[in-house]
């Protein structure tokens, strides 16, 4: 039987949207590739990946991406240290201790927190957190990865909480009952039964949070500084890949110059990082899908 | 039978869920090392009664109870009672097998692990003994590290029994333990119940009258929250005192 016209139009529309989405992604990859190929004609990949200085905007130009990667990873690492324990503890509380009513009120509120514009977080890091930290750590620079990392951690807490809480909440009630009936406390049940059963979901939430942190731009651009440097010292200014891209694309670098092409090289590095993390989370979800009904 | 020691006493027990009065003045004495079957139509309060004995109803928000329940002459609802300790004495097997998504070994030692027992040789011993008792050892002894969810439904239920036995309870509560299983697996569990009553006191909820008559020494018939009749199983089935009981049983035997 032929489908009604209306249904066919809707179907076509949906197909179109899907193609558009995929097409955009492919387009982005193609642009990144085609623009960075000319860059890698002038700068060898080996130099790009091993040189320890990144000074494309100076007169003596060096093109080592490592300082930008280290800056990115440092801020990400700090944010993960903040977000993962807190995010998971909040998730355990919401899923295992809170009353259904409390859970229903707090979860959407957390999700609103995730919708605060990142510029706001950036200024919060620069104007509030950094001065506060300077009272404890006297040598702390005005721009630093510690403050940016902490605030970014606060920003991604809702992401970790929301996804890992979903995974914990999906653990069948019957397993909790089994645990209680064996004489386990709520805490023991949470840590010995619920968290292990929801483990793959929790790991996915962490990976997605890391990917989000790596790709985050405004906080680091505002609060972490613009000084690429190969260091793991959280108290000094650094620069992340994203902050560098913002710096160059908002400056007056002539299009087509080698300096300008660096943002594509940086962009493709960023893309590779986040894409591998997303693939990893996809893989984990597929591989460890909860086996119980 | 009659001269066996009474292990569980329930006196004037009433249970309410909010305004819903679900157990009415229940008086029930259960002797040690016997199997007692709880029968009755759905919603009559069998599970509620069973879950009073290990205080699993405590988690229900509007649960209220009065009356006295003693095990070994100790009021289990007394303030001094630690629920964790009570549940070491009173194990429970559920309707749907609910092993943890862990290895067979880790399932069996769960009750010991949460109580801080770590000695490997002792745990190994307990795992073997419990699985033997649950008639599962021969089937799984070479795959103790395998995930429990890879077992069949009947094996999972026997694993849940082994998990309960591992902490050496006095009492085992079973809430329709075979209703989710095929007949062969059910028969195995019934055999097991028969074995276990040498050392344990078992209370089993069942909708299957044949099962009740096969495995139990005593049967309690509940109807709308009342304990209508409680007697030796053969007396209750052959010669019920109350018309309600007779009608339920004959209706069920079909
Ligand atoms: N968690 C609960 N909250 C409120 N009412 C409940 C709850 N569990 C059971 N009940 C009610 O208590 C009564 C007895 O239920 P239950 O003990 O499960 O009966 P049975 O096991 O004999 O089928 C029923 O009316 C049921 O609706
Ligand atoms: Mg029931």
Image: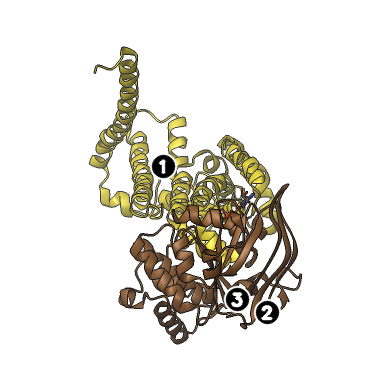
On the rendered image, what quadrant is the N terminus of chain A found in? top left
Can you tell which quarter of the image residue B6 is in?
bottom right
- The residue furthest bottom is B121
Say if mark 3 contacts mark 2, CB within 8 Å. no
Chain of residue at mark 2: B
Q: Position of residue A263 (x, y in %)?
A: 37, 37
Chain of residue at mark 1: A
Q: Is residue B93 left or right of residue A64?
A: right
> Circle 2 — which element?
loop
Q: Above or below — where is B25 with respect to A282? A: below
The residue drawn where x is 43% and y is 35% is: A248
Q: Is residue B179 left or right of residue B240?
A: left
Residue identifier under label 3: B89
Say if mark 3 contacts mark 1, CB within 8 Å. no
Q: Position of residue A192 (x, y in %)?
A: 52, 65
Labels 3, 1: one chain = no
Mark 3 Cβ inside 8 Å of ligand 1: no
Q: Of the two numbered discs 3 and 2 on the same chain, state the one appearing first in sequence.
A: 2
Q: Quick one: label 3, few (<14), some, or many (20+) residues within 10 Å?
A: many
Q: CA distance from mark 1 to mark 2?
A: 86 Å
The residue drawn where x is 67% and y is 56% is: B226
Q: Above or below — where is A157 with respect to B47? A: above
Task: Mark 1 vs mark 2: give the one in front.
Answer: 2
Disc marking residue A58: 1
Residue identifier under label 2: B72
Labels 3, 2: one chain = yes
Q: Position of residue A103 (x, y in %)?
A: 63, 45
| Chain coloured brown here | B
Chain of residue at mark 3: B
Q: CA distance from mark 3 to mark 1?
A: 76 Å
Can you tell which quarter of the image residue A40 is in?
top left
What tint does the image give chain A? yellow
């Amino acid at each position: 039987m032929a489908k009604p016209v209306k249904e066919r139009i809707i179907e076509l529309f949906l197909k179109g949207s899907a193609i558009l989405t995929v097409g955009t992604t492919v387009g982005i990859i193609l642009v990144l590739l085609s623009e960075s190929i000319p860059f890698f004609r002038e700068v060898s990949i080996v130099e790009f990946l091993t040189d320890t200085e990144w000074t494309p905007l100076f007169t003596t130009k060096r093109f080592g991406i490592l300082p930008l990667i280290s800056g990115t990873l440092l801020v990400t690492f700090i944010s993960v240290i903040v977000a993962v324990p807190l995010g998971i503890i909040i998730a355990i509380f919401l899923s295992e201790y809170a009353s259904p009513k409390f859970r229903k009120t707090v979860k959407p509120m957390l999700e609103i927190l995730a919708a605060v514009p990142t510029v706001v977080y950036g200024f919060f890091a620069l104007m509030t957190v950094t001065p506060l930290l300077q009272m404890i750590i006297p040598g702390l620079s005005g721009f630093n990865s510690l403050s940016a990392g902490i605030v970014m951690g606060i920003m991604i807490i809702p992401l970790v909480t929301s996804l890992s809480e979903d995974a914990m909440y999906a653990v069948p009630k019957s397993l909790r009952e089994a645990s209680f009936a064996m004489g386990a406390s709520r805490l023991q049940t949470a840590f010995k039964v619920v968290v292990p059963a929801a483990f793959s979901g929790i790991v996915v939430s962490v990976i997605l949070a890391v990917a989000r942190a790596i790709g985050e731009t405004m906080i680091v651009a505002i609060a972490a500084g613009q000084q690429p440097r190969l260091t793991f010292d959280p108290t000094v200014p650094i620069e992340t890949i994203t902050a560098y891209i913002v710096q160059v694309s908002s400056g007056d670098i002539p299009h087509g110059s080698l300096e300008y092409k660096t943002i594509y090289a940086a962009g493709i590095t960023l893309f590779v990082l986040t894409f591998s993390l997303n693939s990893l989370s996809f893989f984990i979800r597929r591989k460890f899908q909860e086996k119980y009904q | 039978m009659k001269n066996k020691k009474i292990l569980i006493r329930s006196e004037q027990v009433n249970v309410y869920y909010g305004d819903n009065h679900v157990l009415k003045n229940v008086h029930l004495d259960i002797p040690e090392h016997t199997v007692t079957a709880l029968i009755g139509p759905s919603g009559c309060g069998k599970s509620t009664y069973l879950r009073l004995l290990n205080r699993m109803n405590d988690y229900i928000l509007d649960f209220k109870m009065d009356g006295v329940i003693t095990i070994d002459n100790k009021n289990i609802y007394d303030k001094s009672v630690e629920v964790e300790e009570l549940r070491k004495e009173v194990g429970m097997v559920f309707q749907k097998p609910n092993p943890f998504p862990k290895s067979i070994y880790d399932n069996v030692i769960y009750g010991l692990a949460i109580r801080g027992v770590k000695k490997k040789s002792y745990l190994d011993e307990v795992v073997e003994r419990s699985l033997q008792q649950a008639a599962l050892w021969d089937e799984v002894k070479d795959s103790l590290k395998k995930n429990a969810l890879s077992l069949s439904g009947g094996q999972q239920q026997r694993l849940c029994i082994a998990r309960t036995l591992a902490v050496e309870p006095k009492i085992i509560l079973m809430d329709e333990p075979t209703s989710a299983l095929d007949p062969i697996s059910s028969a195995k569990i019934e055999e097991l119940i028969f074995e276990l009553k040498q050392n344990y006191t078992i209370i089993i909820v069942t909708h299957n009258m044949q099962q009740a008559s096969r495995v139990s020494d005593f049967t309690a018939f509940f109807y709308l929250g009342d304990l209508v009749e409680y007697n030796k199983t053969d007396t209750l089935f052959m010669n019920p005192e109350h018309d309600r009981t007779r009608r339920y049983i004959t209706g069920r035997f079909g």
